[in-house]
Image (spheres, helix red, strand yellow):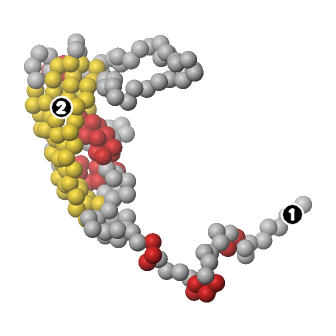
Amino acid sequence: MATGAFPYSHTVKTSRIVDKDEAITVAPGDQELQAIAKAYDLVAMNSLDARFTLKPYRKEGVRVVGTIRTAIVQTCVVSLEPFESSLELEVDRTFEPTSSRPARIRDLNEDGEIEIDLESLDPPDVIMDGVLDLGALICEELALSLDPFPRKAGVEFDANEQEIPEDEEEIGKKPSPFAALEGLKITKED
């Protein structure tokens, strides 16, 4: 079952990945799929399959490379109809027992700002207590890849199809954003 901030957990002890690659498949059961779907506001998650290769990284770290495949049902933001879609996510992440980030404050440029190189590799994530949670990794990758405004294929929003209130149509102008406030009265009590 899930631990922490993620709806799904699948842990692996990193001490077993010492000098050779290890292939691992992670496939949550029906209850876990429902928990993930609920956590990410999906109508349903029909399947999720992650195939990873765990590789030794530096001294005590682990590199996780692989693919996450999932079939989901989302609600279209235009038609409000449920629709099926699938995702295939490529994963290449590294983990270390302690952060490889420097303990000192990063060097600032001459303007006193921190510069971030968007083309460089991400620093390794941290392994907690010798345990790597592949379920959390799957949930993170899924959350980052889901379209926040899912749209069913072929459905488009047409602003011209919106209804115009009759009284505004007669006037020929847009309704005022303050029209709703017009009827309110503010009273001051001493």
Q: CA distance from mark 1 to mark 2?
A: 67 Å
Residue drawn at x 26%, y 25% as measured from the top left? 94
Judging depth in this view, the residue of 160 and 182 nearest the camera is 160
User: Marks 1 and 2: CB-CB under 8 Å?
Assistant: no
Where residue 49 appears, as percent x and y from the top left, is 15, 45
Q: Quadrant of residue 140?
A: top left
Judging depth in this view, the residue of 61 and 165 nearest the camera is 165
Q: Give the residue at the far right of this rendering.
A: 190
The residue that label 1 is drawn on is: 189
Where residue 162 appears, as percent x and y from the top left, is 47, 77
Where residue 62 appears, as percent x and y from the top left, is 21, 22
Residue drawn at x 21%, y 18% as measured from the top left? 57
Q: Quadrant of residue 97?
A: top left
Which of pointers 1 and 2 lies earlier in the amino acid sequence? 2
Q: Disc 1 residue type? A: Glu
The residue that label 2 is drawn on is: 65
Q: Is residue 37 visible?
A: yes
Mark 2: few/some/many CA within 10 Å (<14, 14-19, 20+): some
Q: Disc 2 residue type? A: Val
Where residue 155 appears, as percent x and y from the top left, is 31, 69
Q: Quadrant of residue 125?
A: top left
Mark 1: few/some/many CA within 10 Å (<14, 14-19, 20+): few
Give the left or right position of residue 176, taking residue 105 as reference: right
